[in-house]
Image (tube, rainbow, N blue to C red):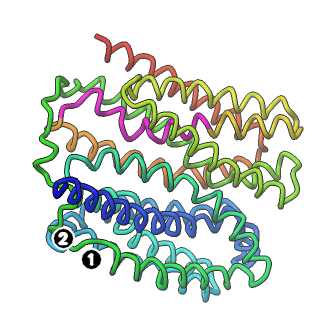
Amino acid sequence: MDGQGRLLGMDRRMAGIMVVLAIGQLIAWGTLGLPAIVGNQLADDFHIDLASVFAGTSVLYVVMGLCAPLLATPFRRAGARRVMMTGVVVAAAGFVVMAFAQHAIVYFIAWVILGLSGSGTLTTAAHIMLNEVAGKNAKGAIGGLMLVTGLSSSIFWPTTAFIAAHVGWRGTCLVNAGLLALICLPLYAFGLPRRGTMVIPAAASAPRPSPHRAADRSTFLLLVAALASSAFVSFGLSAVLVELLKAQGLPAPQAVAFGASLGIVQVSARGVDFLGGGRWDSVTTGVVASALMPAAMLVLIFGHGAYWAIGAFILLYGLGSGAMAVARSTIPLAFYDQTAFAKAMSQIALPLNLIAAASPPMLAALLIRVGSDALLGLTMLCSISSLGMLVLLGRRRVV
């Protein structure tokens, strides 16, 4: 009974940590979706076009990518809890700066500040926290956390639209700052364990030997290209989805409602993959996901703004992009052993961050200057390219 009691206590502590991180990630990612809802208002106030508004998120990803290696030492010495606490304070300051910005340059400075905080508060930081408290058992916890964070847009897009309608986008920035400072900071301070506290003993999960080897150079380049192509579509469309649906003829409230439902579909796809466990490998997940995405683009192109077509697009694209988000994190495991995996992921991270930075303004500019069909054609081409490369990777995996 004593051993069972200790196990129950560890399960409860781990569940508490998961709840804290889930709430923190929902707020952190949800608040960053501000331009997707109030992009036109930002463009009007700063006298810039919509593509430039979405370039703010590009600044975020570039700064995050550059700062991530610099935070390796603080994470190791101070622990994830302290880094994340510092990060949410910086993020709150970033939204305050944005709220009082009168010129576009200050708007972009705010995104630089948010980028500085993002490398210490967003997904990577949460995964480091889970590794600190769960060791090798963190894999399942990370998968569970991904299920929850996929709901950020579903929760925050309609919430942001409601708040902005009553207090404006500047007031919404201050609300975001308050959420970070008054909810996330206390949660991290009192709900996360200090460094060195193992909730699940490391001895409980000795590492298993891996049969994989490090992939050759051509396979690595093919892997990077496949993941980058899919990331271009996912990161870009997530930023401009509401504007894309407006271009299809939907009124703003309905565009927000359809856009918010995307997160629920994406989480459902992640859940199916998570519950599937070992029934299929990550490459198979990627192939199926990549096949769904061009089908979604075709439905929207030929649906001419009909509600059934928009609903089918949200369903197909949501399932594909949701499953692909998991696949991008796990496909490299099929080609690298534990020793080579960390190095490979650090090399893959740079192009993915650059793609995440470039795709929103590129797709926004294409939508404004050429139209929605051109945007859908480009994203369909990228999805088909990713599908072809993943099929080739699957064959190499089998061999």
Q: Is 336 contained in the magenta span?
A: yes
Is residue 307 magenta-colored?
no
**What is the secondary structure assignment of the residue under circle 2?**
loop
Question: What residue is at 83 percent from the left and 61 percent from the top?
Answer: 253
Tell me the element at label 1. Answer: helix
Mark 2 is on which residue type? Arg
User: x and y percent of residue 77 in the render?
Assistant: 14, 71
Q: Residues within 10 Å of mark 2 (few under 14, many from 20)?
A: some
Q: Which residue is mark 2?
A: 195
Q: Is residue 144 left or right of residue 210?
A: right
User: Which residues fall within the magenta stretch?
Assistant: 319-337
Residue 73 visible? The answer is yes
The nearer-to-camera label among 1 and 2 is: 2
Outermost residue on the top side: it is 399
The dot on residue 310 is none
Give the main secondary structure, helix, strand or loop, of the magenta stretch.
helix
Asked if 190 appears above or below 76 in the picture, the reply is: below
Above or below, comparing residue 364 to residue 337 in the picture = below
Amino acid type for the residue under numbered disc 1: Arg
Residue 265 pos. (x, y %) = 64, 43
Q: Local crowd at mark 1 within 10 Å, few (<14), some, or many (≥20)?
A: some
For the point 28% across and 62% down, the residue is: 129
Tell me the quarter of the image containing the C terminus: top left
Q: Which residue is mark 1?
A: 82
Q: State if disc 2 and disc 1 touch (CB < 8 Å).
A: yes
Residue depicted at x 43% and y 35%: 327
Q: Is residue 119 above or below residue 394?
A: below
Q: Residue furthest front?
A: 1
Question: Vertically, is 37 above or below 225?
Answer: below
